[in-house]
Image (cartoon, coloured by chain):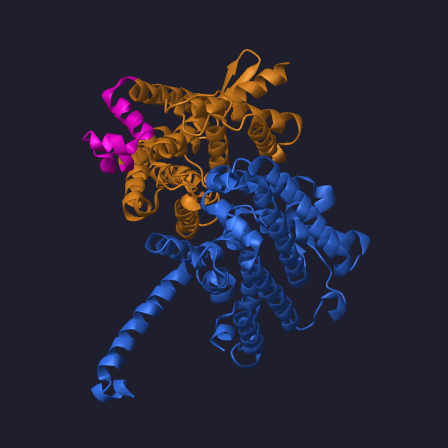
Chain colours: A blue, B orange
Amino acid sequence: MTGLLKSPTTHITGFAIAIASLPFWLIPNSGILAIAIVALLYAAAATAFNLTAGLGGQLSFGHSIFFGLGAYATALLRQDLGWNVWAAVPVALTIAVVAALALALPSARLGGVYFVLVSFVATLALESIATWASDVTGGAAGISLTVGSPAPAELRFENPLGHYYVALILLTTFLGLFAAVTRSNFGLRLRAVRDDPAAAAASGIAVARQRTVSLLVSAALTSLVGVAYLQYISYIDPTSAFGSMTASMIAMPALFGGLGTLWGPVLGATVLISVQQTLNPAFSGLPAGLGLIVFGVLVMALQTIEPKGAVHLLRSGLRHLGQRLGTSKRTAQPAGDSLT
Amino acid sequence: MTIFVQTVLGGLLLGGVYSLVSAGLALSFGVTNIVDFAHGDFVTVGMYVAVVLGGAGIGPLLSAPVAAIVVALFGILIYTTALRRVVDRPQDTSDARHVPQLVVTFALGIVIQNALLLGFGPDQRTTPGGGHVLMLGPFTLDRAQLIAFCLAVTILGLLLITLRSTPLGRVISAVVDDQEVVTLLGIRSGRLLPLVFAVGLGLTGFAGSVISSYFPAAPASGLSFMTIAFIAVVLGGMRNVLGAVVAAPLIGITQQITATYLSPEIANLGVYAVFITVLLVRPHGLFGLKGLA
C-alpha cells in the first residue's frame, strides 16, 4: 500500500485528476483559464526540456527551436496545404528530430557551456531566418490562421476548455514518460553521463549517443507543445516561436522548480508563468515590464538560495516542519503508552 | 571593388567596439568562470547612461567614463549579492556545474531589460551629436564610428599591456591558472575576482555609451551585442582576451558583408554560420591561443 502511494504513477494520476477537476470549482473565468492553459503548455515543454537538461545535463537555452518548428510546421501546412493538425503532427515531429540531430552534431562532443551557446545561437539564427524568409513564413508579421468553424476532432475548439484538456494530456503523458525514463537503464546511463562524462565513458557508456538520444526525444516532445500552442493561439511569429523569451519560458520553469526532478518543471511553470501572465499589462493593467522583473528576480533569488530548485526547498522545508511536529508529538505522549 | 572595401571598412570600424564588449566578456569568463548571459544588457545599461547624460547635453563619448563606472559598480553589486554564491567550482566535473551561474545571469538579463522598459518605455532613444560623415577618397566613414574605433583600440591596448606586463596582470593570469595555489601564496582572490569582473563590465559599459553615438538604444538592444561577444569569445579560444579582441572585427566584417551582399535583415545570419562552422572545424578557437592575454 505504501509502495503504491509512493509510486510516481499514482502521483501523476492523482495530479491529472486534480488538475482536470479545476475548471469545475477553482477556475472562475476565462481570463484565469487562459493563464492556466499557457501554464500547462509551458509545464509540458519544461518537462520535455527536463528530459535532456535535467537527466542528460545538456542545458539547452534554445528549446524554442523545437517549439517554434512545431508551431510553424503546423501553421504552414494548415494555411498553405489545407492539411489538418493530425497530418501536420508527423511532419512537425520529423522536422524537430532532424533539427535536434543537426544541433547534436557539433555539440554532443563538446558538451558543457558550448552546448548552451550553440543552442542559444541556433534559436536566434532561426528567428532571423523566419523573419527573412517572408515569402514562406510571412516574415515578422507572422502567420494568422483563420479560425473557421470549430472541429474538435481536429483540435479546434469553440470552448477553450478543449485546449486546457489537450495541454493537460500532453503534460501528463510527458510526466509519465519522464518517470519511466528516470527508472530505466537509459535514465541511469544519462545521469551517469551528466554527473561525470569522463567516468561514464570509462565505464563503457557511449556518452555522445546518450546525449543525442535524449535530445531527440526531448525535441520531439517539445515540438508537440508547439503544435498544441498553435492550435490554441492560431497565430505564430518569429519572436514568439524562436525568440530568447520563449527559450527562457521553456527552460526557466525547470531550472526554477528543480532540474532533473519530476515535479520541478510543473511547480516552476505554475509559479513563473502565473506571475508573468497575471502581471502582464493586458491582464492586470500594470505597466509593461513589471511581470518579467518579478519573474527574473524570483529565478535569481531561488538560484542563489537553493540551486537545486524550489522542489528541494519545499521538501526540506516540509521535512523540517515534520521533524518539529514529530518531536512535539513524541514529547506530548504519556510515558506509559510506549509499552503497549 | 569600392563597395567591397567600403563594406570591410565599415565592418572593421564596428568591430573595434565589438572588441571592447568581447574583451569584457573574455576577461570575466577567463578569470571568474562566469559565462555572463546578461553581458549584452550591461551594454544596454551603458547606452542608457549616455541617453540620460545626453539629456543634459553631454555627448556619448564624454559620458563613456561615467557609463563605465556605473556599470562596473553595478557589476560589483551583482557579484557580491548573487554571483559569488553560484560561481563555478573548478573541482566539480559534472556537466551541471555551470547551471546556477547561467541561470542567474540569464534571469538578470531579463530583469535589466524589463527595468529599462519600465523606466524608459519601449521606444528607441538616441544621444546628441552623430550623423557626421567623413570622406576618405571614394569611401565614407561615419565620424562617430571612427572615434569609437580609435577609443576602443587605445583602451584595449592599455588592457593588454596591463594583463601582459604588470605585476597585477601576472597575478590575474596566475588566478586563471590555479586559483587555489594563488590563494596559498597569500593573494586574496576573493577580492580580485569581483574586481576583475567589474573591470570587464566597465569596458562593456564604456562600449555601450560609445555605441549609443551611432546606434539607438532600446531595452532589448543588448541581445545582438551579447551574441556577437559570445561568438567572438568562442572564436578567440574561450579564455583568451587577445583572441576575443582579434575575432570581434572579423565578426563585424562578416556581418557587414552579409548585410551588403545578401540582406541587412539577416546580417547576423552570416555570423551565426561562421560560428557553427568554426565549432565544427576548430572547436577550441581560431587561433589556438592559450592563457589569458
Residue B149 position in % (x across, y down): 43, 22
Residue B191 located within the stretch drawn in magenta = yes
> Dominant secondary structure of the magenta stretch?
helix
Give the extent of the magenta segment: B165-194
In the figure, A180 relative to B173: above or below? below
Relative to A110, B259 lies left or right: right
Quarter location, residue A227: bottom right
Number of disc labels: 0
A151 in relation to A287, above or below: below
- What residue is drawn where x is 47% and y is 21%? B288
Determine which quarter of the picture holds residue A289. bottom left
Which sits in the foreground, B186 or A231?
B186
Q: Quadrant of the N terminus of chain B?
A: top right
* Residue in the image at 25% along x and 19% along y: B166
Closest to the observer, A10 or A234: A10
Q: Position of residue B257 (x, y in %)?
A: 60, 24
Q: Position of residue A71 (x, y in %)?
A: 67, 53
Residue A148: x and y in percent read: 76, 65
- Residue B132 visible in image: no
Q: Is residue A324 left or right of residue B93?
A: left
Q: Residue furthest front?
A: A339
Please report the residue visible at 49 percent of the width from the left and 60 percent of the height from the top.
A265
Residue B117 appears in view:
yes
Q: Is residue B63 magenta?
A: no
A153 or A207: which is nearer to us? A207
The residue positioned farthest toward the top in the image shown:
B137
Q: Quadrant of the C terminus of chain B?
A: top left
